[in-house]
Image (cartoon, rainbow, N blue to C red):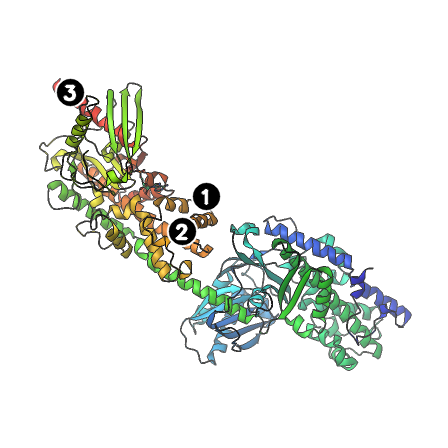
Amino acid sequence: MDSIGSLGLQQGEGAPSCPQEGLPCPSNSSEMVQECLQQFKVTGAQLRQIQTSLLGSMEQALRGQVGPAPAVRMLPTYVGSTPHGTEKGDFVVLELGATGASLRVLWVTLTGIEGHKVEPRSQEFVIPQEVMLGPGQQLFDFAARCLSEFLDVLPVDNQGLQLGFSFSFPCHQTGLDKSTLISWTKGFKCSDVEGQDVVQLLRDAIQRQGAYSIDVVAVVNDTVGTMMGCEPGVGPCEVGLVVDTGTNACYMEEARHVAVLDEDRGRVCISIEWGSFSDEGALGPVQTIFDHTLDHESLNPGAQRFEKMIGGLYLGELVRLVLVHLAQRGVLFGGHTSPVLRSQGSILLEHVAEMEDPSAGAARVHAVLQDLGLNPKASDAEWVQCVCMAVCTRAAQLCAAALAAVLSRLQHSREQQALQIAVATGGRVFERHPRFLSVLRETVMLLAPNCDVSFIPSVDGGGRGVAMVTAVAARLAAHRRLLEETLAPFRLTREQLAEVQAQMREAMAKGLQGEASSLRMLPTYVRATPDGSERGDFLALDLGGTNFRVLLVRVTTGGVQISSQIYSIPECVAQGSGQQGILLNWTKGFNASDCEGQDVVCLLREAIRRRQAVELNVVAIVNDTVGTMMSCGYEDPHCEVGLIVGTGTNVCYMEELRNVASVDGDSGQMCINTEWGAFGDDGSLSMLSTRFDASVDQASINPGKQRFEKMISGMYLGEIVRHILLHLTSLGVLFRGQQTQRLQTRDIFKTKFLSEIESDSLALRQVRAILEDLGLPLTSDDALMVLEVCQAVSQRAAQLCGAGVAAVVEKIRENRGLEELTISVGVDGTLYKLHPHFSSLVAATVRELAPRCVVTFLQSEDGSGKGAALVTAVACRLAQRTRI
Ligand code: ADP
């Protein structure tokens, strides 16, 4: 037997001399008692085995591997950092499950000033047995009644009290205020609660009670509360250890080691739930027949095997079982038991602690035993004291082995050989049991010799810590409200979108009639979409937002072949002088002088003549929208709408010629370039325009113009997001309120970031990497909020675009007097094509707003260049037909 083994029953001066230490006792009885007590002895090797096995079980659970047997759970809490000490405010704390069959309500004031503490006020309520075992609703109603009763005598006003719920049972937490009970432990067994969100159950009960308006802000368990409420000592307090009715611990783990979290930075508090540790190989050798009996007779047989050897709820019961056993063997109490002794739960932790306390003396033991209806002899008291010691010593040693496993884990994850750490301790076993902490401490020193551990008792049962967590949660909730308020104007209702559709229809009609309208509805002189009979070689020039492309398009019976050369447009050209249709005005960031109002075909002819390189006949000038429609039209004859969502946005569609006032003729069709980017320039979109749209517009090179485009297209979405982020930072919601120079830089937030950030396959940590590249250091809360901002902005863009398309297809359907229209839309533009959700949101909006149109969206492959060639080809085809 090694040194730890002999530690077992030698603790404390003045402890009764126990039989196995070799003192004389009735030989037969002595053997029997020794045999009994021997079972509670744990050797150093056994403790080390438990330490190693528990560590393995913890690491396995962290990796997300679940074995067949119930093991430790390693449940992440939503507590990411230990308190800063700056938390302040008044909080109500409700504790359930921390202290056995009672419920505690506390009023905690955090001053935000280090070292300045206000004593909490608290009240304890005993939970009747029938409530602990009855319907769940009854338990939560009981809790709500206790809350009211407590608050009734306090001078509080009934205005949005913030409550932290300390609920100390194994739970799956999915948010600071969302926690699903996995299973009851510690003598509770209420129906209809397992698998439910306990915060919601409490909220419902408080509402049923109706007396106070209480906001349940956060839920934590007692170990987290204990850790969080601990005053930091030499080092930070990063372990919470509770031995009360049951036992559990929590500690700060590196987030990157927690598989379920998908986090790579910072730390997170993990509730180990070590009570369910059950490795047969490690625990089997230290379990006694009494442990087996206790488990068998418990409310949850087979579960929480480790806890049942340590928790205060069970220590008295183990002692009781041993005493019954020894009495029945005739060793104790003259061979008599009593009805009280024979009934489950009659020996409480308090009794054990009292009987074991050497200072109380044998008289106290006698008194306790007499209360149990027993008639102890002088020698009985000593034996009973020995039994209590054996049971409690084993509990403290097992607890030490478990704590040593946590320390090894910390040493390993922090890559520190020598660890200096503070452990916050809480629970009635620590408070009431004189020897538990000293046995625990000595055993830890032996099992984890490289760790310098200071134990800091929690002063108010973790209530302060719960309030700390609640304070942080309240701050986060306030931030969320501000975020929601900020994004609310971006969340358009169906009615708002239908209104946009209606206004677009009106503007289209007016534009076609030549009346004042923000939609110019330009005739393109393209009178037909391709029919497949087009042939020949065509040269196309494609001036997009970012590139200038020259394409040679060969249309043969075998299809369309394209060779192209791409030139990027230098900014000095894009914004310089414009020697290059009649261009109405530049959009999408182009601002070349001398072009607006000029015939671009002439400019182009001139330019070609200046170069004198080739003899070319410029047949048609096509914008990219028309080109897109035409190029898709070559594949699908239903394609009669062209849509661009790239740097800018625009739409064209086939209109009945009779509706086009500026072009003669009543039969046939003509493609109309809506130039819908300018929609709303007459103020009709002002209802939807947010302060962020106004900022983006003001900073643009064409303030007041292209209002629709500025809510939709790639040139602007990143900027809108950037303006929102600046605003949220100024409110203190993001980036801890610290404005960075980078974020003030125009165009620093590219629209492609929206695509990357909103990509489903991307983890939040990658979102953070993108933003960190931008010099924006953020927390995971920040990353989530940035994601939500991006989603709101791109969703609005796609929905507005969809409302516009709905207006166009409905017009075509009505033009043709059809009940139902089947139509395709050719689409081009990088935003539409590469954003992960844009296209499906456009389609969904169109389905909603134009239910009688069956709309297919086709992505154009070689965009406008191929289309331009096809326009020319169709023009040649129609010209030939006219000549014939
Ligand atoms: P253009 O409209 O200039 O002819 P594009 O259709 O390629 O050319 O659109 C370019 C625009 O697309 C850029 O201004 C940029 O804002 C946006 N963009 C680029 N990459 C992405 C992306 N991955 N996701 C969303 N938008 C993007």
- For mark 1, does the 10 Å Cα neighbourhood hold few (<14), some (14 to 19), or many (20 or more) residues? few
In the picture, measured across the screen, residue 720 lies left or right of residue 92, that is left
Q: Ligand 1 shows up in which quadrant of the image?
A: top left
* Residue pointed to by mark 2: 787
Q: Amino acid at mark 3?
A: Arg
Q: Amino acid at mark 2?
A: Leu
* Viewer-nearest residue: 348 or 518: 518
User: Residue 761, which numbered label?
Assistant: 1
Residue 605 in picture, x, y percent from top left: 16, 28
Q: Callout 2: helix, strand or loop? A: helix
Residue 677 in picture, x, y percent from top left: 22, 44
Q: Callout 3: helix, strand or loop? A: helix
Q: Residue furthest left?
A: 664
Marks 2 and 3: which is nearer the front?
2
* Viewer-nearest residue: 296 or 269: 269
Q: CA distance from mark 1 to mark 2?
A: 13 Å
- For mark 2, does the 10 Å Cα neighbourhood hold few (<14), some (14 to 19), or many (20 or more) residues? some
Q: CA distance from mark 2 to mark 3?
A: 56 Å
Q: Quadrant of the N terminus?
A: bottom right
Q: Is residue 327 visible?
A: yes
Q: CA distance from mark 1 to mark 3?
A: 53 Å
Marks 1 and 3: which is nearer the front?
1
Q: Callout 1: helix, strand or loop? A: loop
In the picture, measured across the screen, residue 525 lies left or right of residue 238, that is left
* Residue pointed to by mark 3: 881
- For mark 3, does the 10 Å Cα neighbourhood hold few (<14), some (14 to 19), or many (20 or more) residues? few
Q: Earlier in the sequence, mark 1 or mark 3?
A: 1
Ligand 1 within 8 angstroms of badge 1 C-beta:
no
